Image: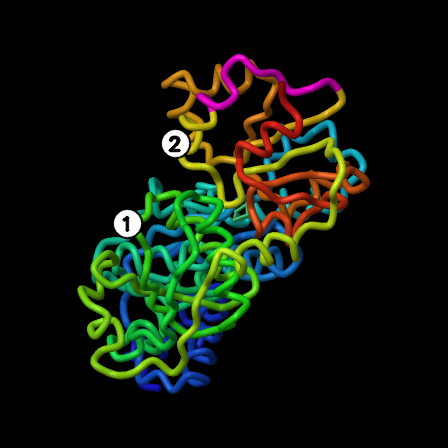
Amino acid sequence: MHLSREDENILKGESGAGRQAAMELLVAIGEAFDAPRMIPINRAHAASSGQEGDLYFAQILAEGGASCKVTTTTNPIVDLDYFQRYVAKEREEASVASKTKNFYKQIGAVMSQSCIPYLAENIPQYGEHVAFSESSATPYVNSVIGAMTNRESIQTALAAGVLGETPEYGLHLKENRKGTVLVKVQADVSDTFSYSLLGQYVGKKIASGIPVFTGIPQRPRVDEYIYLCAMLNVPGAIPMFHIPGITVEAKTEEDAFAGGKPKETITVTDDDLRQTQKELETASGPVSVVIVGCPHYNLDQLAGFAKLVAGKKVRYGTEFFVNTSATTKLMADRTGYSGVIEGSGVQLVVDTCIDMFCWNNLRDKAGMTDSPKCAYYRRFGPVKLGTIEECVAAVME
Ligand code: F3S
């Protein structure tokens, strides 16, 4: 792999141990994928988790004097203030999360703590090279925006943010962005939940590659895209997709496959989506907790949710949590959605993720969610999966 003189010097440690560690990681990745060189990037998103592996690398960078060269946003790392009442039991995990957050701040990362940063805090442009990790972020950025990123890990995205560059391989090259699997959608996909199940089904069925969806009835809404993107990467590793005539890099099906043929063709029916839902459900009776917002709800979703819960109340003895980003919450506060939502007894939570220790107090309770990803990674006990309307009906009246 060819390195510039400046990169060689970074690799030798001449600009500090932090940048050296970042360069060592990216050179190793580049060599593994036969990248010819490094290319500049304009922005990065690290899917920070506040867990041990995340702490380990962030600490090496921070203590080695590294700082972000380009805008680098972060995923949720638990909001300790909000969850103070729970963390007493979970001190150790809380302190790992807290230390990790401080190291991110030290290296100059933007503390967006959002899993949908591409909507507000860190928006790539069409054709731009970036380094984004996070299940929904990578396919959204590649497919919906048309920027170019590989499916990064927390550490490779952070290293790229510190160096302002990434190895040139994979989806940074036009020839690797063509479709590989034709997905004929015969199922009725008409809301966020059905797009979630579609993503979950296709991710599991094909595991990897670039699906090309046909039969999508109209341009998906932003939240439908987000939930499709996220779920593709729960059972699968899908860095991008095309919807001919709708997503930016494929006007036609022929375009999507760059004139070639799909390696595989699958169809998706209503039965497939129903079966996907059933496979993730482990509860059948009443539930005592609902968690939605995985990925974080955007402002449109909060607007719809506020309409849905207006005049209702969370039943005594049950809890309802909605995850969102701090930026979205601010807009929801100003617009009045938060008042309606919180007035109904629903807890609007920022900066955190369903995968974090703060939900451990729910581990013996039966729960419900509208997100296959949340159902898969849940911290609570047996789970039901349903539309947001069904979630509301389960614990509100
Ligand atoms: Fe976001 Fe965590 Fe779900 S990062 S997508 S809330 S698993």
Q: Residue 222: image x %, image y %?
A: 34, 44
- Point out the frontmost of discs 2 and 1: 1
Q: Residue at x 76, y 22 (%)?
A: 317
Q: Nearer the viewer, residue 36 or 344?
A: 344
Q: Distance from label 2 to label 1 (Cα)?
A: 21 Å
Which is the main secondary structure of the residues drawn in magenta? loop
Q: Which mark is residue 218?
A: 1
Judged left or right of residue 253, residue 369 is right
Residue 302, picture quadrant? top left
- The amino acid type found where label 1 is placed reads Gln
Q: Quadrant of the N terminus?
A: bottom left
Q: Residue 384: image x %, image y %?
A: 67, 43
Residue 268, picture quadrant? bottom left
Q: Residue at x 78, y 42 (%)?
A: 363
2 or 1: tag closer to the N-terminus:
1
Q: Nearer the viewer, residue 130 or 147?
A: 147
For the record, the magenta segment spans 306-316
Q: Residue 326: image x %, image y %?
A: 46, 32
Say if 306 sits above or below 387 in the image. above
Q: Which mark is residue 299?
A: 2
- The amino acid type found where label 2 is placed reads Leu
Residue 43, picture quadrant? bottom left
Q: Is residue 134 visible?
A: no
